[in-house]
Image: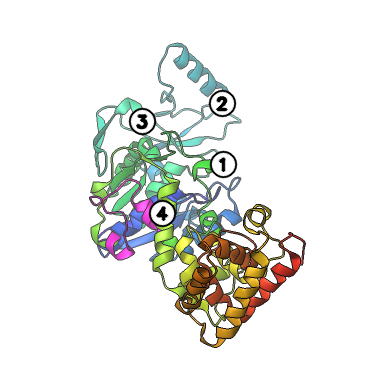
């Protein structure tokens, strides 16, 4: 049984790299009948944002990855951290360091001049003299002076760090505030984490956290450091490439399950399978199969997946999703027909809304290029004849096939080519030439509304004047 967590800092929005890490953590916990926990690491009071906290919670609600416990906030756990800092001081495993900023700068400059790796030299490690005046000390932990820190990473394999790669790092600042690596180790232990899945940018933090685990006698969790998501050129993902607020994906018309399906494949696979339901992800996912190399963001793949889910979710679901975009279709008597027609061409919910409105809204202007190309001398008389056909048969014209049965003979009798009739009708009904099948559009609008729109277009002579 795995207990996992996702622990974002609310200093900015939740981006898809973070959501992918959370998804992997969530899947592994749920697959093993364990627990997935959400912790907000908000100890950086100067950079924290309440809006960011709300956006993170909102994103998890949207994608349906609920925490199995009440969301934890590090800002509310200060007394816990103080307790363990004092414990380490009392046990001689940590100490007060009175090194001034000038001393630290001088040390760094000397080390850089000697081409040495900058690191604290331990000068106050065993200090028992009189503390210098005017210096508020930081608290440093006593890191091992020899040997190696080793652990088995679930993605990267055996990892080993020499002792000189981990100095006596600060666990509490001079104002008493604990540092990131300290609070993370404390929280992961007290929250009973068995498996920590996180980005490989945290790999160098791991030996420091192991020092803390060992000093406090805590069990060390299993670590999985996940390679980053790059842009298609192999460089760091930027906002332009897709590293934007997770909720921006909702605003752009993506379904949550499409985004999760996309993310699970960015670093993990099951053969050549591309489509994964949540049930399949839970059944198949294993973090030991996460790729060791970085993955590449592919917007075309995301759009393809989103189009697949739009076509395959229920129309009731689509109607509910469209409310977010101020598109109310629930009460329409031809809701099913409208959605069946429009979702076939939509890659996003925004495109779906546009396709629906393209049909449902009465056009106020007509495409200039389309009108010039398809509206000829005999077009208006032809449309007037077609109106007569619709009026004579209107009681039987309910489905696209009904309209097709009276339209095809009309085309043959008048020796027309399909575009000669269909494109003027499309322009009349929607204002443009890119609408779906004329039969479908007339069926959705109804014969009376279709006749009304064709007559209006004729009266305006397709001249793009506002109606």
Question: With 463 as the anchor, is 147 left or right in this view?
Answer: left
Question: Circle 2 sits on which residue?
Answer: 101
Mark 3 or mark 1: whose residue is earlier in sequence: 3
Mark 1 or mark 4: whose residue is earlier in sequence: 1
Q: Nearer the viewer, mark 2 or mark 3?
A: 3
Helix, strand or loop under label 2: helix
Real-space Cα separation, disc 3 to disc 1, in angstroms? 23 Å
Mark 4 or mark 2: whose residue is earlier in sequence: 2
Real-space Cα separation, disc 2 to disc 1, in angstroms? 15 Å
The segment highlighted magenta reads 258-281
Helix, strand or loop under label 1: loop
Real-space Cα separation, disc 4 to disc 2, in angstroms? 55 Å
Q: Are marks 2 and 3 in contact (CB under 8 Å)?
A: no
Q: Nearer the viewer, residue 18 or 254?
A: 254
Q: Nearer the viewer, residue 189 or 234?
A: 234
The label on residue 20 is none
Q: Nearer the viewer, mark 4 or mark 2?
A: 4
Residue ID at (50%, 49%): 9
Q: Is residue 279 magenta?
A: yes
Residue 110 on image: x %, y %: 48, 14
Q: Quadrant of residue 363?
A: bottom right
Q: Quadrant of residue 35?
A: bottom left
Q: Nearer the viewer, residue 133 or 336?
A: 336
Q: Are marks 2 and 1 in contact (CB under 8 Å)?
A: no
Is the residue marked by circle 3 packed among few (<14), some (14-19), or many (20+) residues within 10 Å?
many
Question: Circle 1 sits on which residue?
Answer: 175
**Image quadrant containing the C terminus:** bottom right
Residue ID at (53%, 43%): 239
Question: Circle 4 sits on which residue?
Answer: 304
């Amino acid at each position: 049984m795995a207990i996992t967590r996702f622990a974002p800092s609310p200093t900015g929005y939740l981006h898809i790299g973070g959501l992918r890490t959370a998804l992997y953590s969530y899947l592994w916990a749920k697959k093993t009948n364990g627990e997935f926990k959400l912790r907000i690491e908000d100890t950086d009071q100067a950079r924290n944002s309440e809006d960011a906290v709300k956006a993170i919670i909102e994103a998890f609600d949207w994608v349906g990855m609920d925490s199995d416990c009440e969301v934890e906030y590090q800002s509310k756990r200060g007394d816990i951290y103080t307790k363990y800092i004092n414990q380490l001081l009392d046990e001689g495993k940590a100490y007060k360091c009175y090194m001034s900023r000038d001393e630290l700068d001088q040390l760094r400059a000397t080390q850089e001049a000697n081409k040495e790796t900058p690191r604290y030299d331990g000068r106050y490690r065993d200090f028992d003299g009189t503390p210098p005046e005017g210096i508020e000390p930081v608290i440093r932990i006593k890191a091992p002076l020899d040997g190696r820190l080793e652990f088995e990473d679930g993605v990267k394999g055996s990892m080993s760090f020499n002792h000189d790669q981990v100095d006596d790092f600060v666990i509490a600042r001079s104002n008493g505030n604990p540092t990131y690596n300290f609070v993370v180790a404390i929280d992961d232990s007290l929250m009973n984490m068995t498996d920590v899945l996180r980005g490989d940018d945290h790999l160098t933090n791991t030996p420091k956290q192991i020092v803390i685990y060992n000093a406090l006698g805590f069990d060390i969790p299993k670590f999985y450091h996940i390679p980053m998501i790059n842009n298609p050129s192999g460089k760091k993902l930027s906002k332009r490439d897709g590293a934007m607020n997770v909720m921006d994906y909702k605003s752009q018309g993506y379904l949550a399950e499409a985004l999760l399906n996309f993310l699970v494949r960015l670093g993990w696979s099951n053969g050549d399978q591309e489509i994964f339901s949540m049930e399949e992800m839970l059944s198949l996912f294993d973090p030991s199969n996460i790729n060791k190399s970085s993955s590449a963001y592919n917007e075309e793949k995301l759009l393809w997946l989103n189009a697949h889910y739009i076509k395959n979710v229920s129309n009731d679901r689509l109607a509910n999703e469209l409310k977010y975009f101020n598109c109310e279709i629930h009460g329409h008597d031809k809701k099913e027909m409208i959605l069946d027609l429009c979702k076939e061409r939509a890659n996003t919910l925004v495109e779906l809304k546009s396709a629906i409105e393209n049909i449902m809204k009465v056009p106020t202007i007509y495409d200039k290029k389309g009108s010039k190309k398809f509206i000829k001398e005999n077009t208006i008389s032809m449309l007037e004849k077609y109106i007569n056909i619709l009026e004579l048969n209107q009681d039987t014209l309910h489905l696209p096939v009904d309209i097709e049965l009276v339209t095809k003979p009309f085309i043959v009798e008048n020796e027309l080519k399909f575009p000669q009739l269909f494109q003027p009708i499309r322009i009349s009904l929607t204002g443009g030439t890119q609408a779906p099948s004329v039969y479908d559009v007339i069926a959705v609008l109804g014969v009376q509304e279709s006749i009304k729109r064709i007559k209006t277009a004729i009266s305006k002579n397709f001249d793009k004047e506002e109606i």
